[in-house]
Amino acid sequence: MNNELLQSVRRRVLALACSLVLASLAGAGCTTVKPWDRDMLSRPDMAFDSDPLETSRRNHIYNSKEATPPGGAGGGGGCGCN
Amino acid sequence: MKRTRITPRVALLAALILIPSLPAAALDVGDEAYAFEAPLLSGESSAALEDYRGKVVYLDFWASWCDPCTKAIPALEKLRSEFAGEDFQVLAVNVDKSKKKATKFLKKNPIGYPSVSDPKGKLPRRFGLETMPTSYLIDRDGVIRYVHKGFRKGDVEEIRAEIQKLVATQPASRRGAK
Amino acid sequence: MKHRHHDDSETKPRPQTRPSATDALNALTASAMALPGLTGLAGSASADGPVEETTIDKEYSYYREDKLEPRKTVQPNERERMEIHSYQFRVTTPLTERSDLDIAGTLETLSGASPWFVLPDLAGDRDGRPVQVMSGATIDEDRGDLLVAGNYFFDQGKVSGSGGFSIENDYYSVNFGLGADRSLADKNTTLSIGVSTSLDWIEPTDCKDFNRVCSEDKQSVNVYAGISQILTRHSAIQSTVSFGYTTGFLSDPYKLAYIEDVGSAVSDSRPDDRKQFTWLTKYRHHVSGFNGTFHFDYKLYADDWEVNSHTFDLSWHQSLPWGFQLVPSFRYYSQSQAEFFENYYATARSDGLASSDYRLSPYGAITYGLKASWAYEDLIATSDWQLALSYERYESSAGKAFQRVDVENPGLVNFRVFAVRATVSF
């Protein structure tokens, strides 16, 4: 009985920790999306830069007219293929 | 005595944590391929891996949203026709959640081999797929002899060589009765 | 924070006969090309492998700033601002089975006038608010840039390299960048790092006539590190921090700042270097019930000139039948002022710094945008076409800033951008 209680408490603590981590948007490893489940993630509109030409046009304009540089780069997300 | 109540939410989150920690039973060279039966994409009937016992089978997992997968299909169709009449069979498993997209792709790129449909992803999970696409070369006794992960243009050569090797071997004297 | 001592140009304000429509800061941001070079690399549609087809994009865009409001100027015939016709192209093509190439170029024509300096309400007919003096007559300037980038893909990541240059009649710049991505085993998490550098030279037009510097340069380097994480089957997040350092001539040679007690304007004079920090987070969420995707980006920026800014970018990507897509977008931006900025100075600063450039002033801005596109997938041949039309409207004011702003810089700009693009893949 004690073991059962311990297990359920531990699971509950883990679940809480996981939801906190997810909430703080750093949920690595809590829910893994499998390679065959990436249909939506592979959509072009789900890319972090879905329109590079538009991004570069906007960055150029805003960089000329405001004080802030574009920032940010890098990959990730998407199909995960190969 | 205080009882910890496992609410559905806690149970779900706990399950989500526990599932990834379960050992991923990734089938590899030397393992027996999981003898599945699944409905065909065309919906007419089903296909079972067992049906092809005695033949060399190239099992290919694909999806319409996966670019390398769709690049592989015309190449596999070519391989199929190359090895036609040599006890060689290509079998595809499509994991599209929407069969419509898969069927639309095959209309534009017709294949001479069957493709089963597994929208729930039971088969890739059973095989322990680590990337899309992945294909398995299965010998006449149902044992995996070669695993090909991903697909790039030049891969056809390697795959052809592996098929060649396996097609040349004879099946074990026993019949694959289960 | 070092500062530059140079002769106060004691130039009495007068309309220029041949001003340059090119803002040095406008051109200085060619250093930003080093960054777009690396953000542009993310444009391989599948971030895990080279592009499988050759895609050519061609776009024409028209940028037009609103005329300066009459209450913001004392030159009723000098209210026109800037207008830019821009032609962009981009080609992405596979090279080998593990690599691809990305080439992007722009050719644009700028014309119009830009802010020169700000005066207090000397005549007393502007409610005590400062007024903007513009640079005068319209001329045509051309600008061109090119960026070449290559990606090499491994099974669990990629490396990228880029190089580019930018040329205008008074400004030249070259940039280089390197980046690497590495995915963890389950390919749900990807780490990215990169570095880029930019070298710029400026040779202001009519430097002798207007007592400007004649030849200056600056160098910048930027490093970034980022992480992206797939959250669920339909959502993903990416967060990147970058640090930039720029040194050299950072002032705008075409601008002046007015000093009241002397009754004349001095050259825009900014520190010799600048340290910048940017933190950009992007969130993507697909709603399958609506067949649409939500984008939310937040950027936090701070530098050692004491400029801080927040940028919020929201857009909704609505897929419609027959290959149509509609993307409404909204952007909110708010920045604080540079420490040494003033609309005009009561007396000269002891460190010699001076700038009345609206781009270093405190203000906020809102952009509304709408893009409509149509994609056609050819069933028989193997080429795909796409057409897109977009419109954006940008409005800035001191009132839109997060913080309270006492006096708005009269040079704040509003503009419209129309763009039309054609894309072909084969």
Image: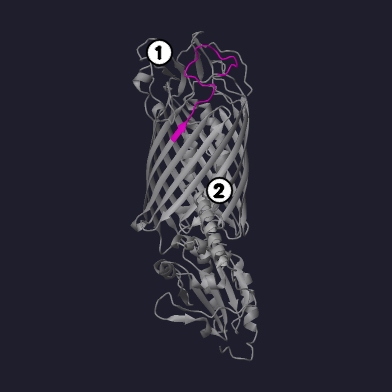
**On the picture, is C142 further left or further right than B100?**
right
Tell me which label, 2 or 1, sits earlier in the chain. Answer: 2
Q: Which of C231 and B177 is in front in this view?
A: C231
List the single residue furthest toward the top.
C262
Residue at left 57%, top 16%? Answer: C208
Instruction: Decide if residue B12 is on the left or right side of residue C241.
Output: left
> Mark 1 belongs to which amino acid?
Asp
Disc number at residue C121?
Answer: 1
The residue closer to the viewer here, A24 or C405, is A24
Q: What stretch is highlighted in magenta?
A: C333-353
Q: Where is residue C108 in the image (x, y as percent from the top left)?
A: 47, 35
Label 1: chain letter: C
Assign a secondary structure to mark 1: loop
Q: Is residue B2 above or below residue A47?
A: below
Q: Which of label 2 and label 1 is nearer to you?
A: 1
- In this rendering, the answer to whether C353 lies above or below C289 is above
Which chain letter goes with mark 2? C
Percent of width and height locating residue C413: 41, 28
Spatial separation of the CA atoms under disc 2 and disc 1? 49 Å
Q: Main SS type for the magenta part? A: loop
The N terminus of chain C appears in which quarter of the rendering?
top right
Residue lying farthest front? B1
**Residue identified by numbered label 2:** C41
- Viewer-closest of B159 and C305: C305
Q: Position of residue B116 (x, y in %)?
A: 46, 75
Residue C200 visible to an observer of this rendering = yes
Question: Based on the displayed image, in which of its 4 quarters is residue C354 positioned?
Answer: top right
The disc at residue C183 is none
Q: Neighbour class for label 2 at 10 Å: few (<14), some, many (≥20)? A: many
Q: Does the magenta portion include C135?
A: no
Q: Which amino acid does label 2 sit on?
A: Leu
